[in-house]
Amino acid sequence: MATLAQSAGPFALGTLSAPDGSPFPGLVVRDRVLDLSTVLAWEPADVRAVLERWEEALPVLHTLADEDALAWQPLDDLRVHAPVEPRQIFQSGANYRQHVIDLEVAHRSPDDPRTVEEARAEIAAVMDRRAAEDLPYVFIGLPSAITGPYDDVVLPGWAEKPDWELELAAVIGRPAHRVSVEEALGYVAGYTIANDLTDRATVFRRDMKAIGTDWLRCKNAPGFTPLGPWIVPSESIADPGDLRVTLKLNGETMQDESTKDMLFGIARLVSYISQTSRLLPGDLVLTGSPAGNGIHWGRLLRDGDVMEGSITGLGVQRTRCVTEEPGT
């Protein structure tokens, strides 16, 4: 199990439970946990309730983290759940330059007359144009797809090409509507890790090419978004635009890229989303996945695979893939 020693800053937030107990919002400091529902004046039932009063809560959390006389529990005695249950999940697509170039090559038709080099050059030009036009691409995910950072991931029987996509996720701490890029990071409470699994076989609607992608089908099966283990406050992350995103499959490194490769940084994404939608405390903004997905390697997920995902300062998640039992 990951400990806070692998995370930045003096503390983090998590959702935990004792064996056979109910989940509670926890303040995680090194190898111990404090139940925030018992020590905060408003008795928050979950982490989202802490985030809804984030500006008030943050200085109190700093004080509590140094109080040794409180009812701390050993982290190793507790189950770690997804750190927050969001109301909304906003997902940035095609946000890593090299990732999109690799996908374009992997999805080339056998009849495509272009060479690999020509295909790469063309999509690189498209990405450069998107960056110049300053227009992110964002779609919506379902909270029901979230699972814990150490839970098994069930691969549905219909998913022919399940793939991994490790991502940095920003966690919103204040309602945000029509905020500027300059203001946007002030609405981010912290950061966590998301693995946005995708069934590559159902990304595109072959029966309705004019409509294009089918994000419901390919990304939103139960448990297709392992989240966590922790929410690390934004003040503990010096530069979210310079973090290492690493995914290992059965111990072999598949993704290992810096968030520097993002076309649009977190401030731009939060601002862009807020021009249309109202972001709420606890909402997630997934920032896209770097190069190194299974479709690139020609090696997709299967029963028994173990994914280990880490991002600088945010800890490590480990999930095992299991195939869906017939009839479930």
Image (tube, grey):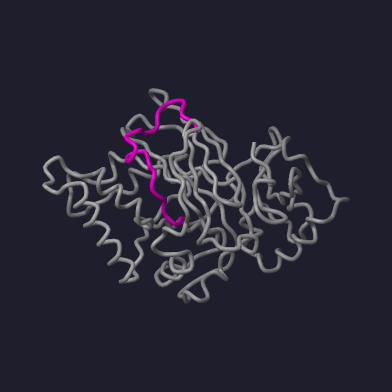
Locate the C terminus and report the quarter of the image it occupies: top left
Q: Residue furthest right?
A: 69
Q: Which residue is at 46% across, 30% downward?
A: 321
Residue 112 falls left or right of residue 91:
left
Residue shown at 73% from the left, 61% from the top: 42
Indicate whether residue 188 is drawn in magenta: no
Q: Nearer the viewer, residue 231 or 46?
A: 231
Q: Is residue 79 left or right of residue 119?
A: right
The prevailing secondary structure element of the residues shown in magenta is: loop
310 on left or right of 36: left
> Residue 2, how many percent across, how many down?
64, 40
Give the x, y percent position of residue 55.
67, 68
> Which stretch is magenta?
286-306
Q: Nearer the viewer, residue 220 or 112?
A: 112
Q: Is residue 274 left or right of residue 161?
A: right
Q: Who's the residue at 68% across and 33% down the image?
A: 20
Q: Is residue 123 above or below residue 24?
A: below
317, above or below 99, in the image: above
- Can you say whether 60 is above or below 288 in the image? below
Taking depth in this image into account, of 57 and 137 the one nearest to the observer is 137
x and y percent of residue 97 in the render? 35, 56
Work out which quarter of the rendered image holds the N terminus and state it.
top right
**Outermost residue, front side:** 117
Magenta stretch encompasses residue 304: yes
Residue 221 picture quarter: top left
Q: How many marks?
A: 0
Q: Quadrant of residue 310?
A: top right
**Place of residue 326 in the rendered image (x, y in percent of width and height, measured from the top left):** 38, 23
